[in-house]
């Protein structure tokens, strides 16, 4: 049982604070154990997605568009309902759908039907969340102690934020995926150089790199594997490279694609061009690492002030404060 009237620091009971922090540490330990024991292999899902893409390309060559849709079930019932609903409201534009599909592909989401869900979320979320906030503020009297300017700002922020929320989440996913691909691109180019010098074709080189780097860089292995499949099935190899540049929102990947297209068109040596690109990308990665290292002291200032220094004060001054408190109570 925690004793009453125990020593206090800044008005906080030391035993209660220690119990709270021990509970937090125990909860963090259980979360870490759960995360470590429930790790799933990401390659199984990616291999399934690549196999689906291979079947789509086979069906596109062997069957008509209507038969392919019936065979592969690309348009589900829910997607048809969303499309009909959005079309009835005249908010569904072909350019908007295409742009959203490109951004979904950059985020690693292959299903094109999710574009309809994103457009639907842009329309519904402001009505649900923003409308609820407006009704609560102006009709139900929420935040009545706030000034009219603050209440109007909160209502406007809820409307704009709920509209931009799908785009913010999608952009965050694209940035994380692009950063992971950028990190492994120099290693992939080195392997492409080795495969090209060993006499492998471009298709076999991409497939080999995807297999070797699949576990270290799963996002990059996914894109290279899909490119290898498209190179084997599409009639125009240039289209496969352009699809790679469209799926990955990186200037470095566009440079690689341009190099691959030029070597295919003019017959220039592929290994030498890729070796130069690999050296440039490694130098760029080193420059980014040095930039992050230079920013580290300024970034560490805030955690040092708010998290490290208070702990040091408690450890150093805590025993002295307890001794002084006990002596004053005895006196």
Image (spheres, rainbow, N blue to C red):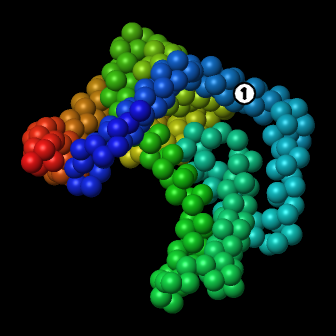
For the N terminus, give its image quadrant.
Answer: top left
Picture quadrant of residue 53: top right
Given the current orientation, which residue lies at the most extreme top position? 198
261 or 253: nearer the viewer: 253
Left-right relation of 251 to 135: left
Name the residue at 49% across, 29% down: 31
The residue positioned 60% from the left and 74% from the top of the image is 159
Specify whether residue 274 is in view.
Answer: no
The residue beneath circle 1 is 52
* Residue at x 43%, y 29% (from the top left corner): 26
Name the residue nearer the viewer: 34 or 156.
34
- Residue at 25% x, 36% y is 285
Residue 37 visible in the current orientation: yes
Height in image: 310 above or below 187?
Answer: below
The answer to which of 121 and 26 lies nearer the viewer is: 26
Question: Along the horizontal axis of the image, is 84 left or right of 239?
Answer: right
On the image, the x and y values in percent for residue 13 come to 30, 46
Secondary element type, mark 1:
helix
Of residue 118 and residue 87, the one placed in the foreground of this image is 118
Q: In this view, does 101 lie above or below 200?
A: below
Q: Position of residue 68 (x, y in %)?
A: 85, 36
* Percent of width and height locating residue 131: 69, 75
């Amino acid at each position: 049982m925690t004793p009453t009237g125990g020593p206090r620091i800044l008005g906080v009971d030391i035993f209660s604070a220690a119990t709270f922090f021990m509970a937090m540490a125990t909860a963090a330990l259980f979360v870490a154990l759960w995360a470590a024991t429930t790790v799933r292999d990401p390659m199984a899902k990616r291999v399934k997605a690549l196999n689906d893409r291979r079947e789509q390309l086979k069906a596109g060559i062997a069957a008509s568009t209507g038969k392919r849709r019936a065979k592969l079930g690309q348009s589900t019932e829910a997607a048809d309902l969303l499309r009909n609903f959005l079309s009835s409201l005249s908010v569904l534009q072909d350019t908007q759908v295409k742009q959203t599909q490109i951004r979904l592909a950059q985020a690693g989401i292959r299903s094109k039907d999710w574009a309809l869900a994103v457009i639907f979320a842009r329309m519904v979320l402001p009505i649900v969340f923003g409308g609820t906030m407006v009704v609560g503020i102006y009709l139900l009297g929420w935040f009545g102690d706030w000034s009219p300017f603050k209440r109007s700002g909160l209502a406007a922020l809820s409307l704009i934020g709920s509209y931009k929320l799908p785009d913010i989440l999608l952009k965050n996913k694209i940035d994380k995926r692009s950063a992971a691909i950028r990190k492994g691109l120099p290693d992939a180019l080195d392997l492409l150089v080795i495969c090209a010098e060993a006499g492998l074709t471009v298709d076999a080189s991409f497939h080999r790199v995807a297999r070797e780097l699949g576990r270290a860089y799963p996002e990059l292995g996914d894109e290279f594997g899909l490119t290898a499949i498209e190179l084997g099935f599409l009639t125009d190899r240039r289209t496969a490279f352009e699809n790679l540049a469209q799926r990955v929102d990186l200037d470095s990947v566009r440079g690689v694609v341009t190099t691959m297209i030029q070597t295919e068109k003019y017959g220039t040596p592929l290994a030498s061009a890729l070796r130069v690109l690999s050296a440039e990308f490694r130098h760029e990665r080193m420059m980014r690492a040095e930039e992050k290292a230079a920013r580290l002291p300024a970034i560490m200032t805030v955690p040092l002030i708010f998290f490290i220094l208070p702990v040091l004060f408690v450890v150093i001054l805590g025993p002295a404060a307890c001794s002084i408190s006990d002596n004053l109570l005895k006196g």
